[in-house]
Image: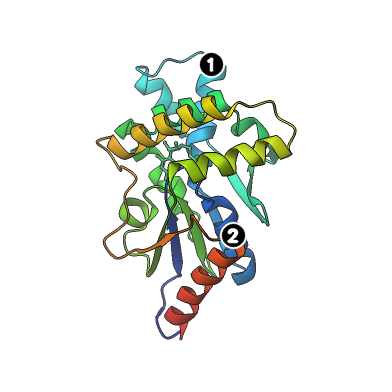
Amino acid sequence: MSGSGDRIPVLTVDGPSGVGKGAVSSRVARRLRWHVLDSGACYRVVALAALDAGLKIDQEDQLVALCERVDLSFEATEDGPLAWLGGEMVDSGLRAERVSRMASQVAALAPVRAALLDLQRSFCRPPGLVADGRDMGTVVFPDAPIKVFLDASIEERANRRYKQLKEKGENVKFAGLFRELKERDRRDRERAVSPTLPAADATIIDTSDLGIEAVVDRVLALVSDWLA
Ligand code: C5P
């Protein structure tokens, strides 16, 4: 590993909702046999626990206390990282629309973000880590040697999400899904703390006209270049 020295290699994969970060990160992690971190799941777990406890977004102390109890692990599958919470598979519950909405609200709170930093960094273990999120390359792993930012138009992202949900037999309406995605994009990009932005040293990949495997190949090529 000539590029790496003694450091554990970290590949950061950032980008907006619905751009395919999960599937790309998970497939790359499988090919490399590295660990995978789905940082969005950290916010989703806190959001779900907050909803279950009936907490409101202004109850910051209680929300931070929830962050301290998160015991998450991930399994890299071809479709994306599967989240396990304390040994129980929780993935589908985390993907519900009300959880997505609450996750993007709790993620705008600086104390919640600070409380989840150590947890996210603890996933950096040998032989390497693929970290998927919004601020992996800018805040959580700013020294990561390989950074990518995946992007695609909102229309394309909404279309992909719509098809995915339809294939799963879910009864969704495109217009509602588009509105939710737009609102989540706005909150994630405009928030004061850790907005969704490419790191200055990230390679930006526009995935609008690319299939998942083509994106995976491009990302693996970046890793090979760095390892060479
Ligand atoms: O990636 P995913 O859609 O699962 O993320 C859920 C929410 O968590 C996002 O809408 C975003 O607000 C937040 N998030 C974040 N920073 C990350 C990952 C996710 O703010 N690194």
- Rendering coords of residue 146 (x, y %): 40, 68
Occupied quadrant, residue 142: bottom left
Instruction: Work out how far the residue at label 1 is from the one at label 2, CA to CA, in angstroms.
Output: 37 Å
Q: Looking at numbered disc 1 in the image, what kind of residue is underneath it?
A: Ala
- Rendering coords of residue 62 (x, y %): 41, 21
Q: Looking at numbered disc 2 in the image, what kind of residue is underneath it?
A: Ile
Q: Which residue is mark 2?
A: 212
- Rendering coords of residue 96 (x, y %): 60, 28
Does the beta carbon at disc 2 come under 8 Å from ligand 1?
A: no
Quarter of the displayed picture in which ligand 1 can be seen: top left
Q: Is residue 145 visible?
A: yes
The residue at the point 41 percent across, 33 percent down is 182
Q: Is residue 48 above or below residue 19?
A: above
Q: Is residue 119 above or below residue 51?
A: below
- Crowding near the residue tagged with mark 2, few <14, some 14–19, many ≥20 C-alpha atoms within 10 Å: some
The residue at the point 45 percent across, 64 percent down is 11
Near-viewer residue (210 or 63) = 210
Q: Nearer the viewer, mark 1 or mark 2?
A: 2
Near-viewer residue (63 or 142) = 142
Element carrying mark 1: loop
Mark 1–mark 2 CB contact (< 8 Å): no
Near-viewer residue (129 or 169) = 169
Q: Is residue 85 visible?
A: no
Element carrying mark 2: helix
Of pointers 1 and 2, the one earlier in the residue sequence? 1
The residue at the point 50 percent across, 76 percent down is 221
Q: Which residue is mark 1?
A: 53
- Rendering coords of residue 124 (x, y %): 48, 60
